[in-house]
Amino acid sequence: MFTGIIETTGEVVSIRETGTNIDLTLRSSIAHALKVDQSVSHNGVCLTVTGIEGDTYKVTAIEETLKKTNLGELRQGSTVNLERCMPAGGRFDGHIVQGHVDQTGICTAIEDRNGSWLFSFSYDVADHHHITVEKGSICVNGVSLTVVDSEEGAFRVAIIPYTFEHTNFHSLTTGEKVNLEFDILGKYIQKLLLRDKQQFVG
């Protein structure tokens, strides 16, 4: 389990295709502290460390992961948000994040508010039943954030300078794809409501 509080970022050193999978090698300041088989969140995607060498480590993203996330769009030199699993007894500073991306969204606008930034995102609601609520939680590229404005298929979040500088939000551009993990409590409630609605209609 993760909290959505990004520890640091990593730089993609190399990408190697192996069948329908890709092997990623990343350089990061936390590489020396990692262990093989350890789970690490990459832009909100939980991946297993498969090898470590100096200040670099390797992970594999399988076809299913590539279809549902933005990891397939990474290139050499890309910056990735990183978070290790929350230790038992650790402080819970963000919200419950599983590292299982629900779907991708698109950054539709970035507004500089002279001390903070407002980022707008849209997402497809046609084949999903995901929702956001104002003041609720959302995970964008692995970052735990509070929703400022919410509507069907769209939401906005406010980014403070520290988050902007210490995550890949500073390099995010309009039109770019991001990973979204919706609040786990909201997903369960929405699922129950849909089930009850279907039973009522039936």
Image: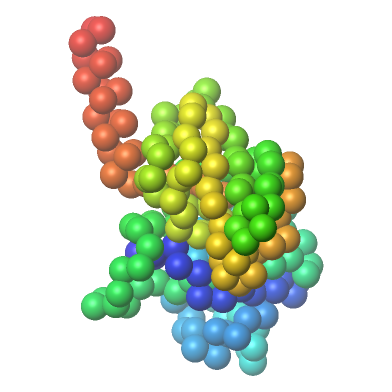
79 w.r.t. 56: above or below: above
User: Which residue sits at x=42%, y=29%?
Assistant: 129
Indicate the quadrant where residue 37 lies. bottom left
Asked if residue 136 shows in the view, the reply is: yes
User: Which residue sits at x=26%, y=16%?
Assistant: 197
Percent of width and height locating residue 35: 47, 84
In the rendered view of the protein, which quadrant contains the N terminus? bottom left
175 w.r.t. 125: above or below: below
Report the front residue among 19 and 23: 23
User: Which residue sits at x=24%, y=29%?
Assistant: 192
User: Which residue sits at x=31%, y=31%?
Assistant: 190
Percent of width and height locating residue 91: 30, 74
Report the front residue among 160 and 56: 160
Percent of width and height locating residue 138: 44, 48
Residue that lies at the very extreme toward the right in this rendered image:
76
Q: Is residue 190 left or right of residue 137?
A: left
